Image: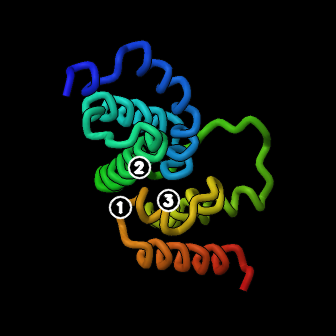
Amino acid sequence: MALEDQAPSTDRFEAIVRAETGPLFGVAYSILRDVQEAEDAVQETMEVAWRRWDSLRDPQKRGAWLRQICVRRCLRIHRNLLRRSWLADRSESAASIPTDHDLDLDRSFRGLTRQQRAVVALHYQYGYTLDECAGLMGCRPGTARSHLARALQTLREELGYE
């Protein structure tokens, strides 16, 4: 394999970064709920992608490959944040004034485990099937289904829908 096939050219990689950064940030923010941490996760994702470019077998699946790296990176970051207890009372600036329902939903969503937040965001916000969510999260489809069922049950209880 030629060296230029193993790593992307700088121009080509910059084009990839421009095209994929927004969607990756959305996924990262959905999981981490922190702007700075989500930006860091996307940057780390791109760094990993640059270093592991030669492991990409199908260039047509580059987006899915990057999302998988990003989701796993976010889950790892979140686990480390919890371990260090940095997660307590982080706040983001809001573009508009949230309603009480928005605050309740956000508080309830933050109370979910990182896997539950990931599967809820990937499935409902980004439209991935549960099998695709499982692949992105690095778990089995049945595990993703269990995380989703528990998350929905928790949200229903927290928000008083039962």
Report x, y in % for residue 113: 45, 66
Q: Which residue is mark 3?
A: 118
Q: CA distance from mark 1 to mark 2?
A: 8 Å
Tell which circle, 3 or 2, labels the residue nearer the N-terminal end.
2
Q: Quadrant of the C terminus?
A: bottom right
Q: Counting other residues with Cα less than 10 Å from the Cα at mark 1, is it few (<14), some (14-19), or many (20 or more)?
A: some
Q: Is residue 40 above or below residue 11?
A: below
Residues marked 1 and 2 touching at CB (< 8 Å): yes
Residue linked to disc 1: 138
Q: Amino acid at mark 3?
A: Ala
Q: Secondary structure at mark 3?
A: helix
Q: Earlier in the sequence, mark 3 or mark 1?
A: 3
Q: Is residue 131 left or right of residue 152?
A: left
Look at the picture and state if 105 lies above or below 146: above
| Closer to the camera in the image, 45 or 84 | 45
Please state the horizontal and vertical placement of residue 123, each as a whole percent of the image: 59, 62
- Toward the top, the furthest residue is 11
Question: Image quadrant for the N terminus?
Answer: top left
**Residue 88 in the image, given as x and y percentages of width and height:** 45, 52
Under mark 1, the amino acid is Gly
Q: Amino acid at mark 2?
A: Gln
* Tag shown at residue 68: 2
Residue furthest front as drawn: 1
Instruction: Give the CA separation, mark 3 to mark 1.
Output: 11 Å
Residue furthest to the bottom: 162
Q: Quadrant of residue 50?
A: top left
In terms of secondary structure, where does tag 1 sit? Answer: loop
